[in-house]
Structure formats: structure tokens, C-alpha cells
Image: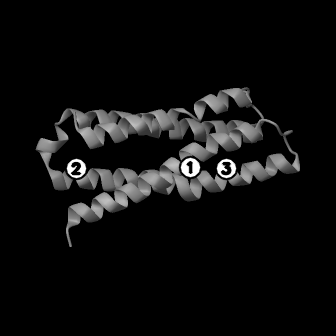
Amino acid sequence: MNIYLLLKSVHIISIIAWMAGLLYLPRIYVYHCQTTHGSEAHEKFVTMEYRLLKYIMNPAMILSWIFGIGLLLVLGHEVSMQFWVQAKVVLVLLLSGYHGFLGVCRKKFIANTNTRSENFYRWMNEVPTVLMIIIVFLVVFKP
């Protein structure tokens, strides 16, 4: 079996799972903003956010990094020094920071200290989309 193709396949699968969470969690926050702290709806959103982050997004992000680093090791130092790879790593670091930011937002909802509006989360929902588009073009065209 070709280790490169295996790593590439599981990397893509883990990225898809991670992106699904990065796109869905801010959407949940949009609706969470409309609830009252302590209400049944609020508690339901807290549970949904926790499960999405802890059971899907965190493992998917970790696996994305592991398989991505594995790909770099298989491809070698020469590929790692190419512009498109370095730019991709920077953008994935930004996605990882965004992931962390979403985790902080979740804690603010739990503590009833969220001051951000539905509109803010609607706009934040576009961040992973833009980064994903740039990353895909970098990987496909390899500038």
C-alpha cells in the first residue's frame, strides 16, 4: 500500500470533519445568542456545542495536524520548503487559532459573559470558508 496516498486520504477525511465543525459551531452560536441564560434552550445549545467541539472538532483537528505532518515527512524537506506548503501551514495555524477562539466563545456562553451579537457570529462563520478556499487553491496550483 502506498503510504503517501493513505496519509493523503485520511488527511482529507479529517480536514472535512474539522471544517464541518468550524462551519457549524458559529451557526449554533447565532442561535444561542437568542436564548436566555439558564433556559432549556440555552442548556441544549451548551450540550450541543460541547459535543461538537470535544467529540468531533478537537479530534479532527488533531488528526488533521498528525496526518499533515506525516505527509510532510513522507514528501521530504524539499517539499516543506516550497512557498505553497509554508503558506498552507500559516493558514492552518490561523484555522487552529480560530478553533481555539470558538472554544473561548463557548466558555463565555456557559459563564453568561458573551457580549457578542448574532451578527458577529454570522460574520465569523465566513472565516473558515475564506481560509479553506485559499488553502485549496494553494494545494491545487502550488504557486
Mark 1 in CB contact with mark 3 (< 8 angstroms): no
Give residue 13's quadrant in the image: bottom left
- Residue named by callout 3: 49
- Please give the residue where the numbered disc 2 appears in the rendered image: 72
Residue in the image at 43% along x and 35% along y: 131
Measured from the top left, where is residue 132 in percent x and y? 43, 39
Residue 21 shows which numbered tag? 1
- State the CA–CA distance, disc 1 to disc 3: 10 Å
Report the residue at 52% width, 32% height from top.
127
Q: How much space separates mark 2 and mark 3, taking CA atoms?
A: 32 Å
Q: Residues within 10 Å of mark 1 (few under 14, many from 20)?
A: many
Q: Amino acid at mark 1?
A: Gly
Residue 126: image location, x then y, percent: 55, 33
Name the quadrant of the N terminus. Answer: bottom left
Left or right: 98, with 140 as reference point: right
Mark number displayed over residue 93: none
Q: Residue flagged by tag 3: what amino acid is it? A: Glu
Other residues around mark 3 within 10 Å, as few (<14) / some (14–19) / many (≥20): many
Say which amino acid is labelled 2: Leu
Question: With respect to residue 14, does 120 lie above or below?
Answer: above
Residue 89 point in image, percent of width and height: 32, 38
- Quarter in which the C terminus is drawn: top left
Does residue 93 appear in this view? no
Mark 1 or mark 3, which has the lower sequence index?
1
